[in-house]
Amino acid sequence: MAIISKKICLVGDFGVGKTSLIRRFVDRQFSDQYLSTVGVKISRKKVDLILPETQSQQSIQLLIWDLEGHTKFKGITPSYLQGASAAVVVGDVTRQDTLDHIREHIDLFLSINPKGWVVIALNKMDLVDSENLDGLVQKMSDSQTNQVLSVYKTSAKTGAYVDEMFELLSRQFISKS
Ligand code: GDP
């Protein structure tokens, strides 16, 4: 049986940790050294899941797209987002402005992919006290449409919730395909 492939775009302001989250998930690595992406990079990762209903194994191929670091928010080209099944919308918990822009990033993604799914990553969790963010997570969860599947407190540095986030999307793709 042919393996299903799905496109996921990482979206969010400059420096929030989009490239780092992909590297953590795909390569199991984190670097403090600043290396911004040039152009568009597409990483491929096969995810194997056990389906709870049947206990059968199902695999899915994720094509994870990352956009060049210096692209201004308004300049994100629709062609980058086009054809994506989901977006991981990332904010940096140490920079309020990046959290304020999450809604706009989601709206833009859904305007191009009305049937797409979204997860929100509140990233760099290792730099703050996790409990201080529970209110924010709740507020974000309450104010979203049902296409926003979940809000995660992630850290590309420690790896917290990174696999869980991509696994949730993978399960969603399999259950809806
Ligand atoms: P992008 O522009 O959104 O792709 O952001 P990058 O992935 O290039 O990350 C920007 C900077 O934040 C880099 O110096 C990373 O090392 C750092 N960074 C990314 N994620 C984390 C994280 O979860 N924790 C910490 N402490 N630093 C992070």
Image (tube, rainbow, N blue to C red):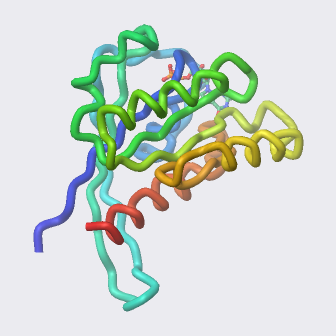
Left or right, 19 with respect to 138, comes to left
Residue 154, percent across and down? 65, 43
Left or right, 92 with respect to 15, comes to right
Position of residue 15 relative to residue 142, above or below, is above
Left or right, 34 with respect to 135, comes to left
Q: Is residue 59 visible?
A: yes
Q: Residue at x 59, y 22 (%)?
A: 101
Is the C terminus in the top left, top right, bottom left or bottom right quadrant? bottom left
Is the N terminus in the top left, top right, bottom left or bottom right quadrant? bottom left
Task: Tell me which image quadrant ligand 1 sits in.
Answer: top right
Position of residue 55 relative to residue 119, above or below, is below
List the single residue furthest toward the left.
1
Q: Residue at x 64, y 48 (%)?
A: 152
Q: Is residue 19 visible?
A: no
Residue 102, percent across and down? 57, 29
Q: Residue at x 33, y 14 (%)?
A: 38
Position of residue 176 relative to residue 110, above or below, is below
**Which of the 4 image quarters holds residue 153?**
top right
Total number of numbered discs in the rendering: 0
Q: Residue at x 76, y 37 (%)?
A: 126
Position of residue 141 relative to residue 175, above or below, is above
Who is closer to the viewer here, 60 or 83?
83
Residue 3, percent across and down? 18, 65
Residue 80, percent across and down? 27, 26
Left or right, 33 with respect to 47, comes to right
